[in-house]
Image: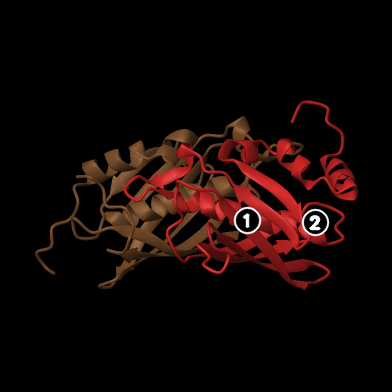
């Protein structure tokens, strides 16, 4: 396992940028590093869950964090492996602000033969003030997608 | 937002009174974005995620993005509470934990049903299950807490 070959980060980044739902929401990859990633989503009227308050639907944050978590997991698995979300949990620490972009950060903090463990959070302007805390686990080499790289 | 639409909650309560739940989705921009719809059956409310190419998060299988599956489960949980419980405002999410059980195929619609496990004065605990061709073979399940008061 010491000599395992990892995916090239550039290829992973390009694969993620091409995924239909990532494109649809306009999720941007700010940082794609080995073991941790930072994604960004801008506010859009079509993301709204409550049109009276202008607050976005929780599904937007779930999609942002599942995406960045999967990206962080892919960054540390052997090239050729697939990665699929096994479970994830979101804790809503405070309400998102209407009209503001949201950053999603995730790091892979542990890996076994079969599972990558990931944690992260979402925030507006400061990582010190998270909106949502996030933990997830990803199965390696199951039926998940394997980037064509 | 800026348009004068009156009290959104009262509007939803009027729809509930009339038993026309399918009309709620038109009030939620995000529901239109990913294709979330509602149907009221004798056995309860069913939330549908329509099969849309832009919802794909895995082009190899292809499968629906895990974040969109999470959005379906969260949406179904909120709508189930609105349908089944006496509420004085929209339930506010505290946390959600999502298990991904089988690939959620991007080539067909996905259905979800909620179950209130406990309704307290302040917090309601909901279980939600999603399936595609067979309700006894769920593709994903979640449990979530919502603030009621």
Q: Which residue: 58% across, 51% down?
A: B71
Q: Which residue: 50% across, 39% down?
A: B52
Give the SS element for disc 1: helix
Residue B29, picture quadrant = top right
The residue carrying pointer 2 sits among few (fewer than 14), some (14 to 19) or many (20 or more) residues within 10 Å by Cα, namely: some
Indicate the chain coloured brown by its letter.
A
Q: Using the image, determine if residue A123 lies above or below residue B148.
A: above
Which residue was labeled with disc 2?
B83
Q: Residue A7 carries which label?
A: none
The x, y position of residue A140, in whole percent, is: 29, 64
Residue closest to the eye, A102 or A143: A143
Q: Which residue: 54% across, 63% down?
A: B134
Residue closest to the eye, B137 or B112: B137
The reply to whether dot 2 and dot 1 touch (C-beta < 8 Å) is no
Quadrant containing the C terminus of chain B is: bottom right
> Pointer 2 indicates a residue of which chain?
B
Q: Using the image, determine if residue A15 lies above or below residue A36.
A: above
Which residue was labeled with disc 1?
B74
The x, y position of residue B141, in whole percent, is: 56, 65
Residue A50, picture quadrant = top right
């Amino acid at each position: 396992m010491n000599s395992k070959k990892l995916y090239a980060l550039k290829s992973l980044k390009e694969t993620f940028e091409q995924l239909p739902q990532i494109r649809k929401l306009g999720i941007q990859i700010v940082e794609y590093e080995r073991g941790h990633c930072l994604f960004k989503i801008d506010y859009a009227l079509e993301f709204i869950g409550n049109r009276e308050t202008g607050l976005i639907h929780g599904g937007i944050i779930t999609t942002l964090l599942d995406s960045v978590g999967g990206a962080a997991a892919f960054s540390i698995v052997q090239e050729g492996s697939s990665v699929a979300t096994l479970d994830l949990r979101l804790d809503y620490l405070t309400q998102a602000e209407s009209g503001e972009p949201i950053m999603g950060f995730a790091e892979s903090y542990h890996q076994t033969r079969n599972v990558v463990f990931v944690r992260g959070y979402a925030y507006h302007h400061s990582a010190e003030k998270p909106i949502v805390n996030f933990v997830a686990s990803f199965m390696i080499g199951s039926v998940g997608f394997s980037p064509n790289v | 937002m800026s348009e004068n639409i009156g009290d959104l909650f009262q509007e939803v309560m009027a729809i509930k009174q009339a038993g026309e739940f399918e009309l709620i989705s038109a009030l939620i921009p995000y529901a239109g974005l990913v294709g979330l719809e509602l149907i009221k059956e004798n056995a309860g409310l069913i939330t549908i995620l329509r099969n849309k190419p832009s919802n794909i998060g895995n082009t190899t299988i292809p499968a629906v993005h895990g974040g969109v599956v999470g959005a379906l489960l969260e949406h179904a949980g909120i709508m189930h509470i609105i349908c089944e419980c006496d509420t004085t405002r929209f339930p506010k999410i505290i946390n959600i934990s999502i298990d991904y059980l089988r690939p959620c195929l991007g080539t067909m619609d996905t259905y979800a049903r909620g179950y209130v496990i406990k309704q307290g004065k302040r917090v309601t605990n909901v279980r939600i299950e999603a399936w595609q061709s067979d309700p006894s073979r769920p593709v994903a399940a979640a449990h979530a807490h919502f603030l009621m008061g």
